[in-house]
Image: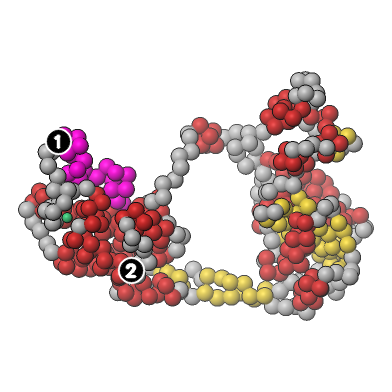
Amino acid sequence: MNGPLIQYEAAREAWLMKFSSEALVAVLITDGNWNHEVHQLQNRELRESILSKRINSRMEVDRIIWTPSKDGKYSAKTAYTVLSEAKPRVKWHGLVWSKLVIPKHAFNTWQLLSGCLPTQDRLVNRKILNVSSCIFCNNCRENSKHLFFECSYTREVWNHVRVLLDLQVDNRNTNRLWMSIFRLCGRQTSEAKIYSVMVCATVNYIWGERNARRFQGKSQTAVNLKIRLVKELRRYLQLQIRDIPDTSVIKALVGRLGIITNFRTNTFIPCTWTRPLQGTIKINCDGAVKADGSGFGGLLRDSEGQVVCAYSGRGFSSSVYQQELNAVHKGIQLAKDQGFTKIEVASDSLGVIRTMNKMEEPPWDCQDQVREIRELAAWFEEIRFYHAFRETNRAADYLAGIGVEAESFICFIAPFPVELCIILEEDKNNKVYLRFHQCR
Ligand SMILES: [Zn+2]
């Protein structure tokens, strides 16, 4: 706040002409709000970025914030992350480093995909060998593309695995094939884990067969290799897979592989919007961050389920946490303004609720606001913060959606839009919402 304005990169460009290099951020603030200098800025991005910063109303002294960590405090761990350059993730990350993949198989696949498998072509390039020839067909040079996909021997093995897994791959060329394998194996599903195990195993078995032929003079037919591969991997997967979700895709997959396992059943938990006790006001609040902006909203209801007032506001920051916090803040402020002394605050943001109940530190850029909310909360005779399932927070969710499009903060009373009226009636009539739950 009292730091030199010149330190703010974006501001420097825009205001270097206007203010002296010693100017403080305070020149942009009048009566605790961002002043016309900010509002008149032509650069929309910069304007909104500044407006999204809350001004500490008490104008406390500046403090040092270590922005890489969530709570703003320095730690060696975050410093290490900042210092070690972030490397882009390779496309095959999910395939090779899936937990279920046998490490030896993962290693061979990693060698293959990062281009360091010692095929004969590579050895010729390094002048270690004079000629390169595929040991399976003696028809082609031995490089990874031919060895693993184009050779008639390996094609037979791959086709068998592909049909068994029902892998929907793009077979037009080797590149497209790998890309579709990476896509299928990179997903966060149980079937993707099994695909990864089988794909990496196939690579390992083909490489193993190539080495057995080259160095031990032993060979087995493609038919034998594919049968052994499936048999051994079936045994491995049978031991590894304890229970998996009950979906048709995974059921069919383990069925084809011949694995017997338990399926987790899915259930639905019923939940309803609950009324506050008589004499207490319940605030439901919610934040929304969408592609076209962010906002927050909420509403105050009494023990009959009647709406005292509803509110929506536009947010400037794209942090969901920030919007959820704004929703809580405004709701409590409204309750205080209207003289309610007993309130309960329900939010579907577990993070905000945990923060308000002092179970979790807020992010550093929300600490001032959290302190303000706590001071506000101290005014009430009774106040309780608790988590509400998203399904029972629909009215607030609707109002947060209005907030995204709102010009400024709005507080309104009935009549409400039809969609909101329907939700309010359903809440009041104890509509049961079914919440999906996966049993462990
Ligand atoms: Zn070949």
Quote the CA–CA distance across marks 2 and 1.
Answer: 39 Å
Q: Is residue 117 magenta?
A: yes
Q: Is residue 109 above or below residue 240?
A: above
Mark nearest the camera among 2 and 1 is: 1
Q: Nearer the viewer, residue 29 or 1?
A: 29
Q: Residue at x 19, y 61 (%)?
A: 152
Specify the quarter for ligand 1. Answer: bottom left
Residue matched to label 2: 165
Q: Which mark is residue 365?
A: none
**Which residues are the magenta region?**
106-128
Query: As shown in the figure, which amino acid type bears the numbered disc 2?
Result: Leu
Where 142 falls versus 438 (above or below)? above
Note whether residue 214 is visible. Answer: yes
Residue 128's tag is 1
Residue 229, quarter of picture: bottom left
Q: Residue at x 67, y 75 (%)?
A: 433
Magenta stretch contains residue 399:
no
Task: Please indicate, yes or no, whether residue 107 appears anywhere in the rendered image.
Answer: no
Q: Secondary structure at mark 1?
A: loop
